[in-house]
Amino acid sequence: MSDGNVVFPQKILKKFILLYKDLTCLWDKECPAYKIKMKRHDAITKMTELVQEYDPSATRVHILRKIGSLRACVRREYKRVQESRRKATCEEEVYVPNLWYYDLLSFIFKNEAPEPARSPIPTAETEEEEDDDCQVFDSQSVDYSNDFNETGNMVEADDVSTISKRYLTFEPESTTSKVKRQFTEVEDEYDAIAGINVAAKLRYLPNNMRVLAEKLINDVLFQAQTNSLTSTTAIMTPDPFKSDAN
């Protein structure tokens, strides 16, 4: 796997999540094995072996990153559900998650107490909802190729930071590592969500269209970095009829 790509069909992803659920030492803080590094290491090995049945080139790093990506998306949906419950006046107004695997993975919230409900306050303006880029996972296949950076035998990741540093090495965590891990637990939606969203859309483009799209994306980023990007910036496509007329 030279480029680190692994694509999950929905059937494999379902098995992946169900196995993760069974391996409670990976997610349940009340599990006796949760703090036993060897148990967690063996659990990740089992998940890696499952994926390798489909793609032999899959590695532990890919598995850790996949877990982090899925958790980030489900947690974002979970937050939207909880927020809507606080504002809803009836059950019909509660937000319904769009991710097909939301219910499958919702077990990770079993130890979280729901936030207390508050009386909804009528307002003239409705609050705009954030775009849910995680819907990129709500498809027949899922990719997690460009979402991790490997340095030595350690991995820095968003929602998976507390997992990766424990499962890829058996070395004790230093004080610096613990502090760094606490900061990296914060969900970085630009890396975990936006990056995955763009990568997934590019993946299904024809080769010639993908090359052009990547060029235009880079052009926009260049203009933004040089402070020349404005609200009037647009892609101009020459009119072939005007060209012929000249």
Image (tube, rainbow, N blue to C red):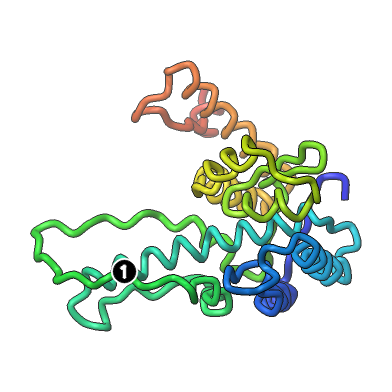
Mark 1: give few (<14), some (14-19) or many (20+) Cα within 10 Å: few
Horizontal side of 234 relative to 103 (left or right) equals: left
Residue at screen point 82% across, 70% down: 46
Residue at screen point 58% across, 32% down: 216
Quarter of the image where one finds residue 70: bottom right
Q: Position of residue 215 (x, y in %)?
A: 63, 31
Residue in the foreground of this view, choosing between 159 and 233: 159
Query: Please, what secondary structure does the residue beneath circle 1 have?
Result: loop
Residue at screen point 87% across, 50% down: 1
Q: Residue furthest bottom?
A: 91
Q: Position of residue 234 (x, y in %)?
A: 43, 31
Residue at screen point 67% across, 63% down: 35
Residue in the foreground of this view, choosing between 147 and 125: 147
Position above or below: 125 against 83: above
> Hey, what amino acid is under mark 1?
Glu
In the picture of the structure, the residue carrying the numbered disc 1 is 115
Residue in the foreground of this view, choosing between 30 and 210: 30
Horizontal side of 145 relative to 116 (left or right) equals: right
Position above or below: 22 against 220: below
Horizontal side of 153 relative to 203 (left or right) equals: right
